[in-house]
Amino acid sequence: MNGIKKKEEKLFSGIIRFNAKILGLVLGLLMGLVVFIATNWLVIMGGHTTHDGITVIGPHLSLLRQFFIGYKVTFTGSFIGFAYGFALGTLSGSLIAWIYNKIVDFKS
Amino acid sequence: MQEHARKLDNKKTVIIGGGPAGLAAAYELSKTGVESIVLEKDQMVGGISKTVNYKNYYFDLGGHRFFTKIEAVENIWKEVLDDNFLHKKRLSRIYYNKKFFNYPIRPLNTLRGLGLWNAFLILISYSYAHLFPAGQEETLEQWVSNRFGKRLYKTFFKTYTEKVWGISCSEIRAEWAAQRIKGLSLVKAVKNALIKPKNSNKKEVIKTLIDSFDYPKLGPGMMWQSMAEIIQGNGSQVCLESEVEAILWNRNNKSIDSVEINVNGQRKLFHGTDFISSMPIRELIQKFKPTVPEGVLKASNHLNYRDFLTVTLIVNKQDVFPDNWIYIHEPDVKLARVQNYKNWSPYMVPDQNKTCLGLEYFCFEGDELWSMPDEELIELGKREMAALGLVQKHDVEDGTVVRMLKAYPVYDSGYRGSLNTVRKFLDGIDNLQLIGRNGMHRYNNMDHSMLTAIYAAENINGANHNLWEINEEPEYHEERAGKSAGELVPDEIIIKSFNRMDKFGFAAAIGTVSGLFIFLATIFLVIKGGEVVGPNLQLLNQYFIGYSVTIKGAFIGMGYSFLWGFLFGWLFAYLRNLFLGFFIYRVKRKVEMLTFRDFLDHF
Ligand SMILES: Cc1cc2nc3c(=O)[nH]c(=O)nc-3n(C[C@H](O)[C@H](O)[C@H](O)COP(=O)(O)OP(=O)(O)OC[C@H]3O[C@@H](n4cnc5c(N)ncnc54)[C@H](O)[C@@H]3O)c2cc1C
């Protein structure tokens, strides 16, 4: 009868559900971009030169290599990092959404 | 096509009531070649919106502003009156405690009028109401006080509302106030708050609708008179002094056969293929022959109305006050509102050195005010105007009284149930449609009354509109107008995005994913091996006491990480719900305030 009222009730009483694909995509893009920007930032800032005359760029970020095989703090590396970050983010986002939706379904 | 034309030829619609709705229906039908006959009991058309002519002083009852967002209605108004409209800037004030306050209320003007001390007290009471709202919201008094504070309620709502309805605000149910604001959709308001319309400034539109209006040179009656002439010119009929006294219906095939009027003691029947009624539902039901089922009759008797009378005074003064109308909040007088018709249109008075005022009193048919002889009412009017200091008694040179039955359908606690029962019965009658204000027992203004009529006419020509959705669902007609950016987003999306987040669900999801993250990272390094296994990840043990990059450590890390993830997720969901809740609360209050901006204008 009163559509507005029904809509208002829904607004107050409903529980949000996530779209796993969208959350995955968003988190994927976010993580990918974080790695991409962080890498290029260090590349642009340049590194420091050690006593042995070696230029070191982003020694800490490059530790990511342990997990992201093939990743380096270089311009090309930023793309590889983006791909890894994107994959990891997508996986995490979709998993978060899936678990959340399952719990909400179970509870209701 | 030809068949359709032939079909229309055979159609004949009988329309009860020659007010804005009845005439609009006949007008629309006449445009499509469908013959109709309008039966009006009064001596003139226009119904509640008619213009009365007293010694060439024109006045209408209540002052009818022409303003609408409905294109179809606006088009008819333009078609019929063309350039006979005046565009007026509205000036209306509240008269309280011998002072004038702008209405709609303007904060600075109100503060000035109330004085610093009173304003301070109002602020305190307003803040108090917001900090400690009354738990119960059963009466109008509680409802308004909870939103505006007791003091503001007493100053600007109580007296006038009580004059309008004739009962104390503590007896009017809160539901009624909620009804008044129901028209504004919260979902829409949330949407507008998020997505500002690009091309049109909605606030500006609403403000314009409240702050200015159109008015026919000779009052609203000019519109209905012209419309009746056009209808007759198109071959249909408008019969005055034709009160419908019986509705003859066929119980078996659930349709109306004819309606009966009484002309000089002679019974006259009007047959038709379709029937449209704008007369009050209660009377319509009572006039059914054979009588309707007992339950329906009983329900219709529970539909109540508030009546209204205007004492018109002709004042021998050029200027009395600059307002179109003034709300009288003074509790010592019965007078509720005063119209100054000359300020609506200078053509309303024959002599610009005189002023014609309409003193409006709300009453019930048969009560003391209603039954008072005209001379006494005119005396009462003069006395009260003098007591208010607005007009001196000796300046009044003439006066007249016009009574208007059923000016307001009453939304009391039982009306919805009764209306539903009656509707259920009437919906079952195939060739009858209800339109208008009292015709649907709905608080329709002229535009919505006319829209119901336009749609009823379209239904006769094959459309399938649900007339009860008009003015119940604002979207119904607004969707006809151009859509703004916000309106293109479906309400469902807004509702879904503003739903609450399940705190436990989100916490558990974040916890699980973080736990897995650390677990897999640790295991990965353990499998990779090396001289020193994962020295950097090992640093986590500064926070996760007992953690190491080992198989056992992977489980410990997972536990810690789950815990922190869980806490973070819970807090995130909690804060998100809290802030969104606060946002919605703010929007809701804003919507309520916006409605109350012109609250008094609705009576
Ligand atoms: C004080 C006041 C101020 C208002 N101000 C505004 C305003 O500023 N702007 C605005 O848009 N609206 C305003 N309205 C609302 C407006 O008056 C109504 O919306 C409009 O008149 C409704 O039209 P209607 O045709 O549905 O009903 P009505 O105007 O009530 O017409 C119904 C007609 O049916 C006739 N009738 C009843 N019974 C029978 C019968 N048995 N047989 C034959 N005929 C019958 C009546 O005589 C009447 O002419 C105001 C109303 C009031 C009371």
Image: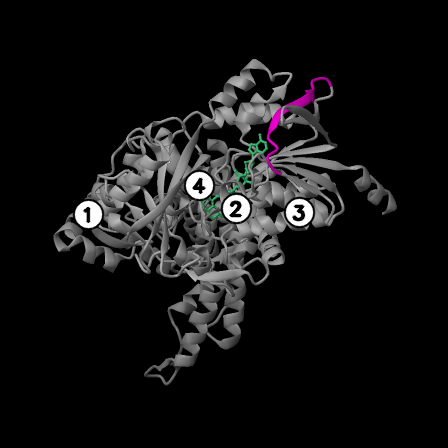
Q: Earlier in the sequence, mark 2 or mark 4?
A: 4
Mark 3 is on which residue type? Tyr
Q: Earlier in the sequence, mark 1 or mark 4?
A: 1
The magenta stretch is B240-252
Mark 1 is on which residue type? Asn
Residue that numbered label 1 is attached to: B97
On the same chain, marks 1 and 4? The answer is: yes
* In this rendering, the label closer to the viewer, 2 or 3: 3
- In the displayed structure, would residue B30 be above or below residue B192? above
Q: Chain of mark 2?
A: B
CB at mark 3 closer than 8 A to ligand 1? Answer: no
CB at mark 2 closer than 8 A to ligand 1? Answer: yes
Residue B570 image position (x, y, % from top left) = 36, 44
Residue B224 image position (x, y, % from top left) = 58, 48
Residue that numbered label 4 is attached to: B182
Mark 4 is on which residue type? Lys
